[in-house]
Amino acid sequence: MSITEKENELFIKWSANRPGFIMDGVPDESAYQASEPRIMFVMKEVEELGGGTGDHREFLRRGRCKPSAMESHDAMGYWPQTIG
């Protein structure tokens, strides 16, 4: 079972009792699987979807980040360098 399938299975359970639940996770599974080490950042809040699907992964795949959000995403790219 793929990561996306596992996420979707989990999100179906979680969303049943959480109105407005936003799915989040690995937006590009093949890139994530190819990376070493594999790091995923879990954030407190998701970026506003702007009437999107309620799936933050799809939102990121479409590249619809606002300029203010891009600053956060750019910064996250540097965090692993400071950790390791």
Image (cartoon, rainbow, N blue to C red):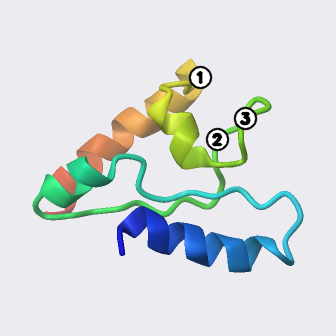
Between circles 2 and 3, the one closer to the viewer is 3
Residues marked 2 and 1 touching at CB (< 8 Å): yes
Q: Residue furthest front?
A: 1
Q: Could you tell me how far apart the alpha carbons at marks 2 and 1 are, in whole angstroms?
A: 9 Å
Res 83 quadrant in image:
bottom left
| Residue 16 position within the rendered picture, expressed as x and y whole percent measured from the top left | 82, 75
Vertical placement of 51 versus 84: above or below? above
Q: Residues within 10 Å of mark 3 (few under 14, many from 20)?
A: few
Q: Could you tell me how far apart the alpha carbons at marks 1 and 3 are, in whole angstroms?
A: 13 Å
For mark 2, what is the residue? 47
Depth check: give the residue in front, 7 or 64: 7
- Which labelled disc corresponds to residue 52? 3
Q: Residues within 10 Å of mark 1 (few under 14, many from 20)?
A: few
For mark 1, what is the residue? 66
User: Type of residue at label 3?
Assistant: Gly
Kindly identify the residue that appears in the image at 28 percent across and 42 percent down.
77
Kindly identify the residue that appears in the image at 25 percent across and 43 percent down.
78
- Precedes in sequence: disc 1 or disc 3: 3
Vertical placement of 8 versus 9: above or below? above
Q: Is residue 21 left or right of residue 64?
A: right
User: Type of residue at label 2?
Assistant: Glu
Q: Is residue 6 left or right of residue 48?
A: left
Residues marked 2 and 3 touching at CB (< 8 Å): no
User: Type of residue at label 1?
Assistant: Lys
| Residue 43 position within the rendered picture, expressed as x and y whole percent measured from the top left | 54, 59
